[in-house]
Amino acid sequence: MHALSRVLLVLAASTVSAAFDARQVPEQLHLAFAGADAGSGMTVSWATAAATPDAAVWLGTVADALAVADARVQSASYFSEGDYTLVQHHATLRGLSPSTKYFYKVGSPGDDALQSNVSSFTTARAATDTTTFEVAVYGDAGDGANSASTIKLVNALAGQVDFIYHIGDISYADDDFLAPGALLKFGFEQVWNNWTNSLAPAMRTTPYMVVVGNHEAECHSPACAEKATRLRALGNYTAYNARFRMPANESGGALNMWHSFDHGPLHVTSISTESDFANAPTNQYTAVAKNGNFGDQLAWLEADLKKADANRARVPWVLVGMHRPMYHVGYVGADGNPTAGTTPQFVQQAFEELFLKYKVDVVLAGHEHSYERHLPIARGAAVADGVSADRKTYASPKAPVHIITGAAGNAEGHTARPSNTAVWAVASDYEHFGISKLKASRAALEWTFVAAASGEVLDQFVITKGGSAADSNAPAPAGSAASTPTAVSALLVLACVAVATLL
């Protein structure tokens, strides 16, 4: 019996060894808010190097008491070549409670070795939540030395911020050939994988919400151009839309191209400045894959902003994230509007009137590898009503506040400092890699721009909201005196005269 037992143990071990496939070990875990109501859902995403037919998610409110969740796992691979494949898995957990910490793991129920470690997340805040919280915001974060400090900082913020908002240009996989000695190498997928794994401490615990940028469009390196199969498989934002799962279904959007979600007092609308509006950039460098054609973005945007504006009593702040800015001092005419014939002008023509009509509070952008903070702007004019003399407090601004925060770091380095400026430009930084941080409450949005390497605060200001939320951001009609800097200056002079008379 003793000898027989040993034989059986050897056979059992051999069977387990044969069944074990290390390619099914989960990697690249990341999270995204889900659910029609804030805090009611979370999408868990991960990747494996081989198909996992029984892929599952375990969930619980206690780390050592998890159970397989009733959530369908959607699995697919968008690119395979030779012995390389990567399968993306997405599972949306529903029926959750707001502001609640859950523990989870992912993998194959048939083998503990094919399961991830236990991680945790906290669901979104309900509109009734009155506490203050923080958010990390940045764009243009790639793989490599220029982003090393940013990645370290963002990972350190895990557990300190409620979510991370990446406003386009993610990983810079399409710049794979710019690395030293990589001109003719095919590194598109490797860059994506390295970048996602580098942010694992943050992404597996903190919802990572994304906006589409031009660097998500396609692979156009010399190595990609060698094979039409690569160009077809990696064109039209395929990798980006396959790797992430934003709440498009819940918000009526289109894949990861445009979507929205609520978090406490914030309504966050993400749009595409890369496709589906008049004169949109093609971001197309090859003749194989055609980019765009995801739907009627403008109709969706108006419906989304109209609904958000009508909901101000519950969710007072409306933020829009888009990759390309409409207001950047490098592309501005004498009248304060974007330079004629440039993409910023086309972005303005497509979106600004909707932002003004529905009183968007803040417009966040990247694309420029720098930081810029502006006065509230309407149709090229600074609207300085409520802005303090030191320009550090914007009290109930009457037009959207535009912020560019695209300095997270990537292979292309910084945007050069423009030689000109604009009347609405307040603060800028073209030297440091860094991110923006938002401290949000129902009454105020406190913004800082922080150097990634040192943690130094390089710019800081606050937007407050007082009185009726519905009236807090109503720009004057185009051409009216109240919308011009001259009118604001005149009012200030009259106020000073009145005070002097009283004294």
Image (cartoon, rainbow, N blue to C red):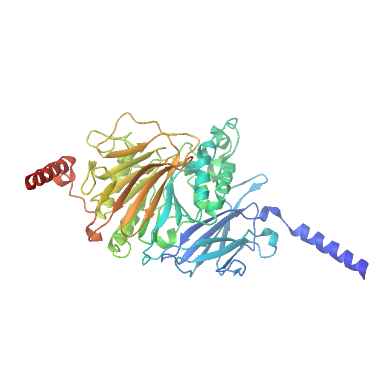
| Residue 189: quarter of image | top right
Q: Is residue 180 above or below residue 252?
A: above
Residue 366: x and y in percent read 40, 42
Left or right: residue 250 versus residue 360 is: right
Q: Quadrant of the N terminus?
A: bottom right
Residue 125: x and y in percent read 42, 63
Report if residue 133 is visible in the image: yes
| Residue 187: quarter of image | top right
| Residue 340: quarter of image | top left
Left or right: residue 328 versus residue 183 is: left
Left or right: residue 316 versus residue 288 is: left
Report if residue 217 is visible in the image: no
Q: List the single residue furthest toward the top.
A: 419
Residue at (35, 42) in percent of width and height: 325
Q: Is residue 377 above or below residue 262?
A: above
Q: 293 or 206: nearer the eye? A: 206
Q: 198 or 239: nearer the eye? A: 198
Q: List the single residue furthest toward the left.
A: 501
Residue at (33, 52) in percent of width and height: 298
Residue 346: x and y in percent read 31, 41
Q: List the single residue furthest toward the front.
A: 503
Please tell me how many numbered marks the rendered image carries.
Answer: 0
Residue 336: x and y in percent read 24, 37
Left or right: residue 3 versus residue 23 is: right
